[in-house]
Image: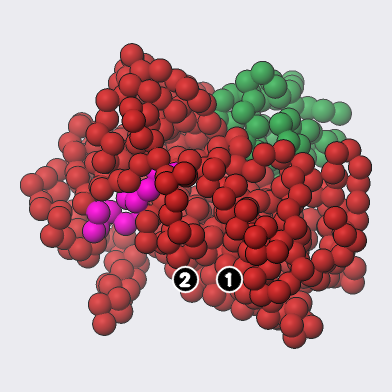
Chain colours: A green, B red
């Protein structure tokens, strides 16, 4: 189950979220972010995103 | 693309290109892969670099140098300005680069040295056998390939996965990353001879605003805030506030965002058949955020160690330990000192930063060494001396060694 939502219109595909993900659930593929099932909804990615492009789904 | 190489370097930033070039010049069969279709784009960097250190790796070329900087002007929260001349400002002065062209120029150097370069080629996993990294699974234009190598060098940046695949935890905590946003702006009216830094917890919590000249009337106007202070407002929100207030009439020509590791040295940057370099190894400077020079230094060491290890037929951590030792005793030493300074400075209130700036007012910086600067600061701020006692000891030792 994907538990975060990346707004691709805001995302600057910088990869900062990938670097902080403790589960290694994120991947920056060229110009978009992919999320796999190991995401725990911890919200660190949403916190540190420079442009606020990530939302944790409730 | 072949099935097998001596060395595969993952990521064609400054670290990866220098590693690939160094290994190729030694006669190794090298593949440099880059997941993007263009090397150097999108930019995630303020683009400032020290002249002296840059020259160690590449001859400066006007095609990728935008500005030649003479000094830095640092503003404390109440507007007190400290000007640092070239001799002591260290990493804050030098050239402001056009990274899109600079990174490609470095990759070109590696190609000229004999390395094979592949763009739009993404590492998906490592090939592991008996506890050794033996190659990389890559995707190129939607097809996957297994490519074997005696040594893999991970230069895959802040979003690095290579270390994690080999069992090295490189994940950054929010307090270990500066989250950054930057506009390339026209019409700021800054003096193109200086880099500008604005400190203050209101404008950039546990970070700073920078304005780096980019030639003509252009400048990189950017901000980094500590990840642990982000959330309610993000880096771009702080940047928009600063720009609206300071340069209401300037025009935005480009937007760049990025995360800069400020964790300091991580525990381990090697595994059997693997070395991590640059931002992937968290080798950026924890106080300035500068990473280009450290990345190139690490890349060079890694390229040389790869050659030695492959020549001896031993790519185990025992052989690669030389890389670990060399980078830790050179750039690692600076990174450790900067981490101590970062931890002290990010705990300061705006009032404390102002009082530090006041203590330096009227000091003639042009004739000062870094040691003089620290003495001036410590004389006026006993608490700072205590907080930075470890650093102080190291700096004295380093300066004395340096002068000898």
User: In this view of the protein, which residue sits in the foreground, B12 or B230?
Assistant: B12
User: In this view of the protein, which residue sits in the foreground, B335 or B350?
Assistant: B335
Image location (x, y in percent) of residue B351: 23, 37
Image location (x, y in percent) of residue B168: 71, 60
Question: Is B89 inside the magenta-drawn segment?
Answer: yes
Sort mark 1 into few (<14), some (14-19) or many (20+) by Cα contacts within 10 Å. Answer: many
For the question of whether residue B347 can be seen, the reply is no
Label 1 marks a residue whose chain is B
Q: Which mark is residue B301?
A: 1
What is the spatial separation of the Cα atoms under label 1 and label 2, in whole angstroms?
11 Å
Sort mark 2 into few (<14), some (14-19) or many (20+) by Cα contacts within 10 Å. Answer: few
Magenta-highlighted residues: B86-97
Q: Residue furthest bottom?
A: B312
Please state, as top left, top right, bottom left or bottom right, where the C terminus of chain B lies in the image. Answer: bottom left
Residue at (38%, 23%) from the top-left corner? B186
Residue at (32%, 57%) from the top-left corner? B90
Image-quadrant location for residue A11: top right
User: In this view of the protein, which residue sits in the foreground, B166 or A42?
Assistant: B166
Image location (x, y in percent) of residue A28: 72, 38
Asked whether the beta carbons under mark 1 and mark 2 sit within 8 Å of each other, the answer is: yes
| Sequence-first disc among 1 and 2 | 1
């Amino acid at each position: 189950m994907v538990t975060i939502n990346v707004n691709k219109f805001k995302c600057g595909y910088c990869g900062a979220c990938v670097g902080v993900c403790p589960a290694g659930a994120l991947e920056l593929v060229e110009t978009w972010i992919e999320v796999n099932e190991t995401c725990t909804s911890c919200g660190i990615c949403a916190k540190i995103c420079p442009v606020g492009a990530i939302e944790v789904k409730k | 693309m072949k099935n097998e190489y001596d060395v595969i370097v993952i990521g064609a930033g400054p670290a990866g290109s220098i590693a690939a070039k160094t290994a190729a010049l030694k006669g190794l069969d090298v593949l440099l892969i880059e997941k993007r279709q263009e090397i150097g784009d999108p930019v995630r960097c303020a683009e400032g670099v020290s002249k002296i250190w840059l020259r160690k790796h590449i001859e400066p070329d006007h095609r990728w140098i935008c500005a030649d900087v003479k000094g830095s002007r640092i503003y404390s929260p109440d507007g007190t300005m400290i000007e640092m001349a070239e001799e002591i400002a260290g990493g804050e002065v030098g050239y402001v680069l056009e990274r899109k062209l600079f990174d490609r120029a470095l990759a070109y150097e590696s190609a000229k040295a004999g390395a094979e370069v592949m763009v739009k080629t993404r590492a998906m996993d490592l090939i592991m056998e008996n506890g050794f990294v033996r190659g990389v699974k890559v995707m190129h234009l939607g097809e996957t390939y297994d490519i074997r190598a005696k040594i893999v060098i991970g230069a895959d940046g802040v979003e690095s996965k290579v270390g994690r695949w080999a069992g090295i935890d490189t994940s950054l905590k929010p307090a270990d990353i500066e989250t950054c946003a930057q506009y390339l702006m026209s019409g700021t009216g800054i003096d193109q001879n200086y880099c500008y830094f604005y400190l203050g917890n209101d404008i950039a919590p546990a970070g700073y605003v920078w304005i780096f000249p980019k030639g003509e009337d252009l400048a990189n106007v950017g901000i980094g805030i500590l990840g642990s202070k982000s959330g309610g407002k993000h880096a771009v929100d702080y940047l928009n506030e600063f720009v609206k207030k300071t340069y209401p009439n300037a025009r935005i020509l480009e937007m760049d965002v990025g995360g800069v590791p400020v964790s300091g040295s991580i525990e381990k940057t090697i595994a059997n058949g693997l070395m991590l370099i640059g931002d992937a190894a968290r080798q950026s400077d924890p106080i300035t955020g500068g990473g280009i020079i450290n990345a190139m230094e690490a890349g060079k060491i890694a390229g040389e160690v790869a050659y030695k290890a492959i020549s001896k037929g031993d790519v185990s951590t025992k052989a690669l330990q030389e890389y670990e030792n060399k980078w830790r005793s050179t750039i690692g030493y600076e990174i450790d000192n900067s981490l101590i300074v970062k931890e002290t400075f990010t705990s300061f209130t705006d009032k404390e930063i102002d009082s530090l700036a006041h203590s330096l007012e009227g000091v003639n910086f042009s004739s000062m060494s870094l040691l003089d600067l620290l003495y001036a600061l410590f004389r006026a701020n006993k608490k700072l001396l205590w907080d930075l006692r470890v650093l102080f000891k190291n700096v004295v030792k380093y300066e004395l060694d340096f002068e000898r």
